[in-house]
Image: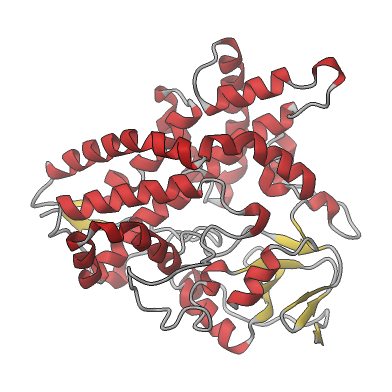
Amino acid sequence: MVWAMADETLSVPFDEDSYYQDPAGFFAQLRESCPIAPVQMPDSRRMWVVTRYADVRGALTDPRLGKDVHRFPGRSLSWPSEAVGLHAHMLHRDGPDHTRLRRLVQQAFTPRRVAQLRPRVEEIVAGLLDEMAAARGGTIDLLDAYARPLPITVLFELLGVPTPDRAWTTAAVLDYDDRAKSERVVRELAAYITDLVAAKRAEPGDDLISALVRARDDSGHDGAEAQLSDVELLSAIFQLIMAGFDTTVNLIASGTLALLMHPQQAARLRKDPSLLPAAVEELLRFTNPLNHATDRFTTEDTPIGDVVVPTGEWVLLATSSANRDPAQYPDPDRLDVGRDTSGHLAFGHGIHYCLGAPLARMEAEVALGALLARFPELSLAVPREELRWRPTSLMNGLRSLPVRVA
């Protein structure tokens, strides 16, 4: 066991070219040379980057890695969103609080509920493909025309966000990428969600926000402990809006790109659509809609692999690197839609495993299967090297995906 030194920090380039445009290559270098290494991040924080599959999977379930910054050792920290009361969601909670909040939301994402949503997803997909067909012979941005509208429409219908508000809300989520705009976005979303909760309280519907409002208003009666506080209610809705469609957008767009770059694999799926569920798992592993898990910190000296990370250090668990670890997946940089991807970490692992995973899988399966069948001659409209990715550490998402519709 090696004890890490407090003054050790690797001078690893962490900029748009070395990381944002090629995270797989960035993490591969670390995985091969320094699989558990302190790296200076763009926001000046030092983070211990963990890149091997076994280490990442083990750390995702280690209770010594905390997420609630109010538990940060030795000093009091707060979330930027705390100023407007949008910080108290399950991604920022540990232990019993996380379990309580998750239980209130997970009913919307059960396999049975997702199966009930499938006909509506197929209907939305068919409409979007009809619109794409009108552009035959031309070029479109698949992100704007297909990969983004599907998950956004499904999410907003599930939540109960009124149709006139959806364009503004989508723009707000996209603006959040820009650090100069993120504070404004959080303030505006706080005001909007507060008004939306009031509207659902006055006129509830058959949607998730109305259900959460009922959980808040019906709890705490007769001396019972409240299930949900006002701040937790607003925070839960904020989290669902911010995280609910971005990863699926990335999966559909990057999954399409991967298949365009591997036409033999696309041909396999057209010939045998029964491979689609396995293909979605392989595309999750191969494209990794998230580069890494959300931030964690050590609440005490914590062994990770053969290194002991000191108390009070930030830890970045590179799930995308774990999914390309040759010790877990032979020839990991090869796309194989028939591969056994058991245990991939694209949705995380442990108590923070992605709540919307069943919905994301189903949407991607329907979207990719229908796209392959409807447009077998779809092709990339620009050289692969001209594509650019969003300059965010967490999200592994394309800025655009120009394609020719044949």
Task: Identify the residue at horizontal 21%, vertical 72% (top origin).
Answer: 264
> Is residue 141 found left or right of 395 in the rendered image?
left
Q: Position of residue 50 (x, y in %)?
A: 65, 74
Q: In the figure, 114 relative to 267: above or below?
A: above
User: Quadrant of the image for the N terminus?
Assistant: bottom right
To which quarter of the image does residue 39 belong? bottom right
Q: Residue furthest right?
A: 74
Q: Nearer the viewer, residue 255 or 74?
A: 255
Task: Identify the residue at horizontal 56%, vertical 15% (top origin).
Answer: 199
Q: Position of residue 172 (x, y in %)?
A: 49, 38
Q: In the figure, 46 relative to 269: above or below?
A: below
Task: Identify the residue at horizontal 30%, vertical 63% (top origin).
Answer: 257
To which quarter of the image does residue 168 belong? top left
Can residue 100 be seen at all in this image of the molecule? yes
Can residue 45 be seen at all in this image of the molecule? no
Q: Position of residue 12 (x, y in %)?
A: 61, 80
Task: Identify the residue at horizontal 72%, vertical 44% (top origin).
Answer: 99
Q: Position of residue 321 (x, y in %)?
A: 53, 74
> Is residue 195 found left or right of 337 in the rendered image?
right
User: Quadrant of the image for the C terminus?
Assistant: bottom left
